[in-house]
Image: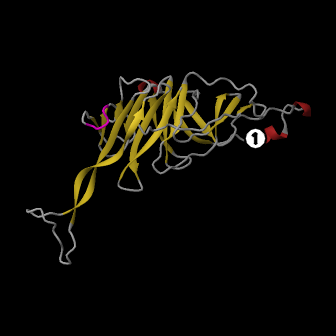
């Protein structure tokens, strides 16, 4: 399925109180924590890179982007604060013989670009980040266990009702249709989430996604003839119709969750499909 891919190019530049990068002994990625990915129909971004604290004595950088989720970040005190620069103060210059260097005395802690509340997050969670600006964001926190590997998942965050049809034969003669309700723009529930179950690695299935929309048609009279105006031009009328968004195939992978997120498309009166990958 044209998979929605939670995406983030990340690599941590680790910094301790020495103020220097510490790449020689980079600790292993946490086994629990929160992954972050951007979801924006406008292709909006956040500042990059961002800094976050690993502890009170160490910080790292991370780039949050679309399509691929970041490595897991361990929250501190029930939240993850993202800073514009290194939030760890430099230590004293031992060679100076003073307790504090001039540089340390002038150091000012950088401001928090944005903060994400993780107090109710699962031990393994991922966070959809929806930027309004580089520093103002909305977020949706989800549990990784609801989007297991070897799975294909669809989340409808648009204002439109969406239909997904699945066909094992490929011609949709055996079509199985599921309706995902629209309007829940900042949350995920059983009414706007769909997951493929029972598939195995390498399985290929055809799918078709459509949404409730409006299209223009020529107005017809009782005899089926096109109605024209005084200048002889066809009269158009708007009618409700299912609008096709995507028709293709997806391949099930045992190494990652494939997530497609549907959002309102600001460029047109319709729905846009974004892809995210959640790999272990």
Q: Is residue 194 above or below residue 162?
A: above
From the top left corner, tell me how far across and down residue 211 is, in percent.
30, 46
Q: Name the residue located 74 percent from the left edge and 30 percent from the top edge.
A: 23
Residue at the bottom extreme of this rendering:
231
| Quarter the N terminus occupies | top left
Quadrant of residue 247 in the image? top left
Q: 253 or 105: nearer the eye?
A: 253
Residue 171 inside the magenta-drawn segment: yes
Q: Is residue 107 above or below residue 121?
A: below
Q: Which residue is mark 1?
A: 107
Q: Name the residue located 35 percent from the left edge and 25 percent from the top edge.
A: 197
- Residue 24 in view here: yes
Residue 78 inside the magenta-drawn segment: no
Residue 205 falls left or right of residue 279: left
Residue at the left extreme of this rendering:
222
From the top left corner, tell me how far across and down residue 48 is, in percent.
62, 44
Within 10 Å of disc 1 (Cα), the crowding (few <14, some 14-19, many 20+) is few
Q: Considering the numbered disc 1 on the image, is that residue within a helix, a strand or a loop? A: loop
- Count numbered badges in the picture: 1
Q: Which residues are magenta?
A: 168-172
| Quarter the C terminus occupies | top right
Q: 125 or 28: nearer the eye?
A: 28
Quadrant of residue 220 in the image? bottom left
From the top left corner, tell me how far across and down residue 152 is, in percent.
41, 31
- Residue 183 in view here: no
Q: Name the residue located 49 percent from the left edge and 28 percent from the top edge.
A: 256
From the top left corner, tell me how far across and down residue 148 is, in percent.
44, 25
Q: Is residue 231 above or below residue 212?
A: below
Q: Is residue 200 above or below residue 138?
A: above
Q: 276 or 251: nearer the eye?
A: 251
Q: Main secondary structure of the magenta part?
A: loop
């Amino acid at each position: 399925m044209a998979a929605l891919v939670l995406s983030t190019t990340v690599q941590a530049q680790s910094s301790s109180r020495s103020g220097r990068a510490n790449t020689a002994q980079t600790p292993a990625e946490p086994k629990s924590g929160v992954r972050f990915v951007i979801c924006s129909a406008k292709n909006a971004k956040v500042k990059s890179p961002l800094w976050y604290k690993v502890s009170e004595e160490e910080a790292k950088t991370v780039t949050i982007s679309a399509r691929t989720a970041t490595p897991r970040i361990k929250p501190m005190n029930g939240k993850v604060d993202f800073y514009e620069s290194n939030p760890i103060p430099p230590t004293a210059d031992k060679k100076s013989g003073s307790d504090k260097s001039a540089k340390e005395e002038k150091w000012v802690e950088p401001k928090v670009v944005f903060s994400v509340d993780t107090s109710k997050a699962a031990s393994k969670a991922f966070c959809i980040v929806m930027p309004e600006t580089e520093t103002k964001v909305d977020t949706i926190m989800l549990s990784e266990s609801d989007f297991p590997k070897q799975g294909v998942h669809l989340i409808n965050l648009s204002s439109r009702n969406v239909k997904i049809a699945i066909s094992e034969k490929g011609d949709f003669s055996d079509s199985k249709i599921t309706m995902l309700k629209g309007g829940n723009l900042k949350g995920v529930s059983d009414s706007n989430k769909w997951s493929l179950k029972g598939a195995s690695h390498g399985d290929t299935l055809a799918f078709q996604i459509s949404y409730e929309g409006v299209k223009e048609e020529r107005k017809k009279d009782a005899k089926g003839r096109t109605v024209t105006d005084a200048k002889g031009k066809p009269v158009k009328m708007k009618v409700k119709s299912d609008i096709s968004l995507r028709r293709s195939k997806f391949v099930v992978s045992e190494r990652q969750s494939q997530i497609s997120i549907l959002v309102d498309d600001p460029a047109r009166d319709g729905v846009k499909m974004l892809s995210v990958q959640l790999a272990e």
